[in-house]
Amino acid sequence: MTGEDEVRARLSALPEPPIPDEVASAITARLADEVRLRSTGGDPGPATVVPFTARHRRRLSGLLVAAAAAGIAMLLAWTIAPAGQPGTDGPPVIRAGAIYEPADFADQLRQRFLNAPAASAPTHTFADSSAGIVSCADAVDAYGRVLAVDTGSYDDRAAVVIVTSYPADTKYEEIWVVSPVCGSSDAVVIRHMVYDVDASTATL
């Protein structure tokens, strides 16, 4: 076992550290302030700041252990904010017509994330409204910014792919393949992974 493996093993054996209520409240308030500032400065469209929920607290608490093992310093917050490609301030990019196959999913996802145009018509899924996207992200315990939503099929079944930022390691994104009614009923997660969707690590 390497030194890093030993650190990970020791940290994983520790109890999950809780996120204090005052920290969660302070982060949510700070995000709301920034949204108001951007809105008054002429940024396109309002943003929606979603406060911590019990599920997000549990998931983020677990991430503290992984972040410590990797030596990553980060600000933990869960928000659905204006986001396009990582680091921009546009709304989530909604795409349609994806036909994903499990064997080539990662490559197909990257190609569509980088090159496919936004949908020009309603997708008839939860992705057609910001409230629907928020509800689905909450249902799957997403904690990053929603960057893109891609509707279509996965392994010959109707599906929607959600891509969010990944605060535990910002070189990567987090991906969920879900049912088209995600958020309005029990979340059906068909696939979940962390992947460098925008090819950012290739430039490091």
Image: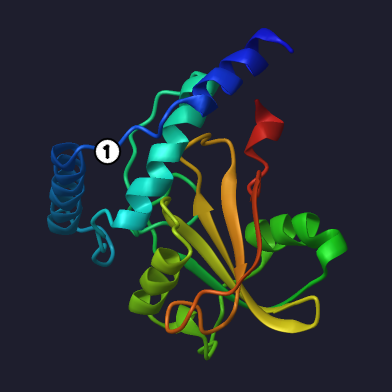
152 above or below 202? below
Q: What is the number of callouts on the image? A: 1
Is residue 173 shown left or right of residue 86? right
Query: Where residue 74 appears, x then y in whole percent?
Result: 38, 30
- The crowding category of the residue bearing disc 1, from other C-alpha atoms within 10 Å (few below 14, some 14 to 19, many at least 20), is some
Q: Which residue is drawn at 34% across and 38% down?
A: 76
168 above or below 102? above
In this view, which residue lies farthest toward the top?
3
Q: Of 198 and 10, which appears nearest the observer?
A: 10
Q: Residue at x 42, y 31 (%)?
A: 64
Q: Of 157 and 100, which appears nearest the observer?
A: 157
Is residue 14 shown left or right of residue 203? left
In this view, which residue lies farthest toward the right?
103
Query: Where residue 134 appears, x then y in whole percent?
Result: 37, 69
63 above or below 148? above
Q: How is the image coloured?
A: rainbow
For the C terminus, the quadrant is: top right
Q: Which residue is drawn at 43% across and 68% down?
A: 139
Q: Name the residue under label 1.
A: 19
Quarter of the view holding residue 60:
top left
Query: Where residue 49 appears, x then y in whole percent?
Result: 24, 58
- Disc 1 on helix, strand or loop? loop
For the N terminus, the quadrant is: top right
Is residue 35 shown left or right of residue 178? left
Query: What's the amino acid at mark 1?
Result: Ile
120 above or below 199? below
Q: Of 28 and 121, which appears nearest the observer?
A: 28
Q: Which residue is drawn at 41% across and 51% down?
A: 143
Query: Where residue 39 appears, x then y in whole percent?
Result: 17, 58
